[in-house]
Amino acid sequence: MNRIASVLLPMPLPEAFDYAEPEGMNLQLGDQVAAPLGPRLVRGVVVGLREAAGGNRPLKPLEAILDEPRLPPGTLEFVQWAARYSVDWPGQPLAIALRGARAPKPKPTRIVEATGVAPGRMTPARTKVLQAAAGQGFGPPDLARAAGVGAGVVKALIDEGVLAIRLVEAIATYESPDPARPGSQLNPSQEAAAEALKAMLAEGGFNVALLDGVTGSGKTEVYLEAAAAALAADPTAQVLILLPEIALTQAVIARVTERFGAEPGEWHSDVTPPARRRVWEGVANNRCRIVVGARSALFLPFPNLALIVVDEEHDASFKQEEGFIYHARDLAVARGKIEGAAVLLASATPSLESLRNAEQGRYRWLSLSARHGQARLPDIALIDLRQSPPDHGRWLSPQLVKAMGETFARGEQTLLFLNRRGYAPLVLCKACGERMTAPDTDSWLVEHRYTGRLVCHLTGFSMPKPKACPHCGAHDSLVSIGPGVERVEEEAKTLFPQARVAVFSSDTVFDAREARRLIEAMADGHIDILVATQAAAKGHNFPGLTLVGVVDADLGLRGGDLRAAERTYQLLAQATGRAGRKDRPGQALLQTWAPEHPVMQALAAQDRDAFVAAEMAERELAGLPPFGRLAAVIVSAIDPAQLESFVQIMAQAAPNSAGVEVYGPADAPLGLIRGRRRKRFLVRADRMVDLSAYMATWRARVKPPGAIRVAIDIDPYSFL
Ligand code: ADP
């Protein structure tokens, strides 16, 4: 009897489709197949196989099994689990999992081989060619070169049938990492953490540990030890290291390469399609045993994943907000469970979610409380901007400028941290008061001086800065309000004309190579003052950096979302943690208008525990994460009336369920993006509620018209 194959297609479809398995095809789960869809053939993956019960209407047969690696069972299960958790179509995470498979395969190479046919006549040149052809596989020109003869000799032997050309598929190969290479000599507390991790790995199976260590304590050294143990225990074991920023992947790739004598696979949005293909295939065929990557590396087809490291686990960049919405830290734990792998979350400022899990004993809690070696944590002081304001039109207070001058005079480096790209966050007409906004989006246009353009950071819309106010027509009336990194760079250059000043933000550093170059220039002391957004403010080691100035410490507190205080604390603790990494002591100065704010007080006192305890108490009282669960629904449409009537229907359809509260619909703070009006619901649930199931039930009860989009965000990080 024939079988029915359930095939998942990497597109936004509600479920897998059934196809007939043609005679003799012999499908297996995870096979990539060519499936007919309407008039087209599309790539799909077999996720189910069952015997056909007679009498059903005939199904379309599958066209072929693709000559591609099979997706391992764990990957299939993970993709489907992720879709269920995120309340999205399973084709969405599958599309991420197949991203590398869909990049073009490298072209097969041509090699020349002896066929066994004896040549009609022998000459010394022919003998040389036949000898060379017996060795490694050369292409025709290389063979002639290796034999030291003209191309005609090789061609004649091919024409005679003595030699033949064979096409050889290019196979992604990787040098094997050597876990036996010596790592750093660990200090006693690193040693204790590494031993605990090794014991956890030796136990085998799924376990999660939180490696909680102050900045510069050597967390990377410790997790590389754990990786070495995993690789040594099983010659086919694979290790995944996830990082929140491309700039950080570069630094960790260098350290992994040095530690194991082999380059890991590199995976992030800036990797070219052929390189992506190579990593994907290398992972699937188990030749690539270590991957260092950004969040989507979690969807690679590992057949034998033993350890997942999520470095800087608190970082909000692990949350993917567009398309398939997911949090890579949470999904890493889920994937670890499915694969029976160990998961290691590392941070100097762990998320409240992970701290809570550690406190409750669900995660093992390993701490490194001091910096390695001579290095001490920096002194942190607050600059009260009410008492010591910058000069008019300036952003750096006299106190900070003085410290920068002293640092520069000692030949040491300064990092000025400001989490705002561009030159100025707002352009205003001083004649009529008009604020420049994007035409189809509710957000201010940010001025960029390098390009002379006004840019919408949300949608990418940009336009040249106009000469006259588009509203009232006044000339030379547009003024730039507030600072971005470019403006602070301008000020630093004016104040210290001899200093080498550079900017690090996603506008000035477009790709991984440029990021690496700038990080190395800073680490090697070729930059005196680095003005940076968060892209450069986390994770890195800059030995000559002794002063960190935070230009606007209050910036992140203004958003007022649930995690504003936590996020500000984490970001500033990370940024200030760049100072004083080696033997020279460091200091950090935070410019603030609200020095009495609990976040500023905790930073100055370096009292993380007190801050965490206060924050936990507030969340517990309100039943917010990690004590409760949240989900958001964002509904958008072009027509406001249609949007309004649909959100009312949706509100009516919300299931009644114990322990679940639905708030909204409310206008989203960003009410208009790309011409679409937006409304939001917020759902709060008790911890024990299966919120994904609740949201799926709700969604199934409504049928949005085609012009309406409904996005569900489980555990939202953005409330805009
Ligand atoms: P973290 O990840 O906790 O910020 P790193 O692992 O990056 O810390 O270590 C900070 C710096 O200290 C790095 O330059 C690292 O090479 C160095 N370091 C840490 N531990 C050791 C060790 N045991 N031996 C030598 N150098 C170390």
Image: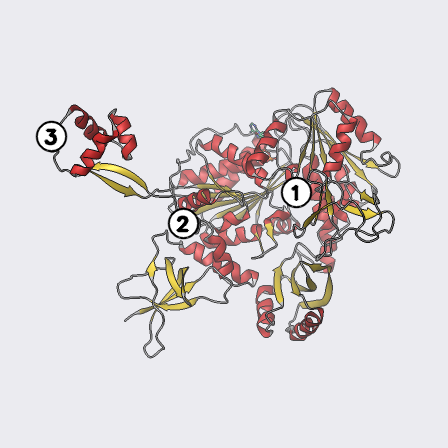
Q: Is residue 191 depicted above or below 44 in this figure? A: above
Residue 697 pos. (x, y %):
58, 71
**What label does residue 303 carry, if any?**
2
Pick whichever of labels 2 and 1 is earlier in the sequence: 2
Quick one: quadrant of the N terminus?
A: bottom left
Residue pointed to by mark 1: 349
Residue 315 pos. (x, y %):
63, 46
Indicate the amino acid at tag 3.
Arg
Residue pointed to by mark 3: 121
Which is closer to the viewer, label 1 or label 3?
A: 3
Mark 1 and mark 3 in contact? Answer it, CB < 8 Å. no
Residue 608 pos. (x, y %):
71, 42
Q: Which quarter is ligand 1 in?
A: top right
Pick whichever of labels 2 and 3 is earlier in the sequence: 3
Quick one: quadrant of the C terminus?
A: bottom right
Residue at (60% x, 55% y) in the render: 322
Pick whichever of labels 1 and 3 is earlier in the sequence: 3
Residue at (76% x, 25% y) in the render: 496
Residue at (41% x, 40% y) in the render: 233
- Dot 2 alpha-carbon crowd within 10 angstroms: few under 14, some 14 to 19, many 20 or more: many
